[in-house]
Image (cartoon, rainbow, N blue to C red):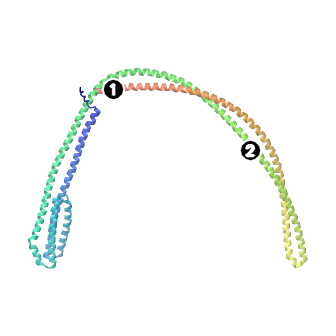
Amino acid sequence: MTQKQVQRPLKVNQIVPVGFGVVLILTGIVTTFSEISRAKLRQMHNQEERTYEIKLLLNELEKDIVGAETGQRGFLLTGKENYLQIYATAQNDFKEHTEQLKKLVNSNPFQSQNTNRFIQLTQTKFAELEETIGFKKNGQEQKISAVLASDKSEQISNDIRATLAGMEQQEKRVFEQLEKASDQFQLLSSVINWGGWLVSVGAGIYISFYVIRRIMQPINEVAYAVATSSGNIATSVFEQERIILQQSASVNQTTTTIDEVGTSALQSAEQAESSANRAKQALTLAKEGSTTVGLTIEGISQLRDQVMAIAYQTTHLSEQTTQISTISDLVAELANQTNMLALNAEVEAARAGDQGKGFAVVASEIRKLADQSRKSADQINSLVNQVQAAINSAVMVTDQGTKKATEGIKLTQETGEVFASITDAVNKVFINNQQIFLTAKQQAVAVQQVVSAVNDINSGAKETAIGITMVKNATIDLNKIVQNLKNLV
């Protein structure tokens, strides 16, 4: 048994695209045909212009031939060279117009054949004109008369005129045919364009009425159904809004109470944390004090070592100063002996008379140098005595500094032991405060979690109340819209 399939009607969202798609397709077809018509008309117009140009060129070519004959006959009758200039100008214009004519008739085989025949005839004609001009230049008058009197010249001229007339008639017929076809095509294009636009407008109007009819009937039915349902929904929503508002008020009070407990717990945790931080600072300071004491001990030890090194160097310097004093005494003794030798040398030089004068001068200078050496040695001894006194004072001060440094190391070590005891005590206090802080913090976190949970419940209740209010307002608006829709439908 075969079951017939029931064909469902198209929906509105299917009818609108299909209907307006048909309108757009019809509009596109009309527009496309209109553009094609314009292009075809432009093509016909171009052909008409080309036909008109060909006719003008044919007239110009005929004038060029007449001009060439005029120049040739004027020269034959008068023998003046200015007629040959007219002849040459006409011949050049003829060549230029002939090239233009070839380009214009290139797409028409019949006219191309006539153009070739015309060019051959004109070449024969121009050859005849050239021949008569040559006879005139050579003084052969009899030959000129024979050429002009022959039937061949007249026949060529008649053939040229007949060819031009035939080409002109052909272009005239083509022009008339194009004009007639253009008028017919333009009329057909106008009919199709207007008909297409009328069909498109009619289709659009029909689809609009069809869509309106398909839409209004379901909307009318839905409007009455929605009006009934929205009234029932509004009653239910009002009752739910009242209940939700009561729940929201109760949860809000609970949230306030738990929030106060959470605040107290946080304050306790903050106080415990502050105490732990202070204990930690005290522990840090105690450790820094111990470190500083250690550094002080190390610095004083280094200072003691340096003072002892200075004492050793001072003792060594004292020994070297003694050696310098000995050397200075030796220099003074040498200066005294040198002075005595110089004095004896002066005495011996005086005994020698004139021969010992030079030696006396030398001995005098040596005695002066000896005196200066003795004076320098005395100054060195004086400076060495001063340095020796300063070194003795430095040795005494160094001994005292060494003793003081040893006493300072002992006191600093005792201070370090005190700081170690303080560090141990503060460390124990810090550990106890840290435990208190952790316990208080755990309590504060637990209370905060309770507060957060209650806040979430409160937020949910508020959001539910807001949602119910929005549903109520939307239901009221829906009732108004339905009433307006019922009035419109």
Q: How many marks?
A: 2
Q: Earlier in the sequence, mark 2 or mark 1?
A: 2
The dot on residue 480 is 1
The dot on residue 435 is none
Q: Residue at x 21, y 64 (%)?
A: 99
Q: Secondary structure at mark 2?
A: helix
Q: Nearer the viewer, residue 109 or 127?
A: 109
What x and y, as percent, mark residue 217?
A: 26, 27
* Residue 254 visible, this angle: yes
Q: Quadrant of residue 3?
A: top left
Q: Residue at x 24, y 38 (%)?
A: 22
Relative placement, left or right, of 434 versus 133 is right
Within 10 Å of disc 2 (Cα), the crowding (few <14, some 14-19, many 20+) is some
Q: Amino acid at mark 1?
A: Lys
Q: Quadrant of residue 287?
A: top right
Q: Amino acid at mark 2?
A: Gly
* Residue 79 visible, this angle: no
- Say which of marks 2 and 1 sits in front: 2
Q: Residue at x 85, y 67 (%)?
A: 370
Q: Residue at x 28, y 36 (%)?
A: 17
Q: Is residue 406 depicted above or below 344 in this figure?
A: above
Q: Secondary structure at mark 1?
A: helix
Contact flag, marks 2 and 1 (Cβ < 8 Å): no
The dot on residue 299 is 2
Relative placement, left or right, of 281 versus 2 is right
Q: Is residue 426 depicted above or below 139 in this figure?
A: above
What x and y, as percent, mark residue 233?
A: 36, 22
Quarter of the figure with the C terminus: top left
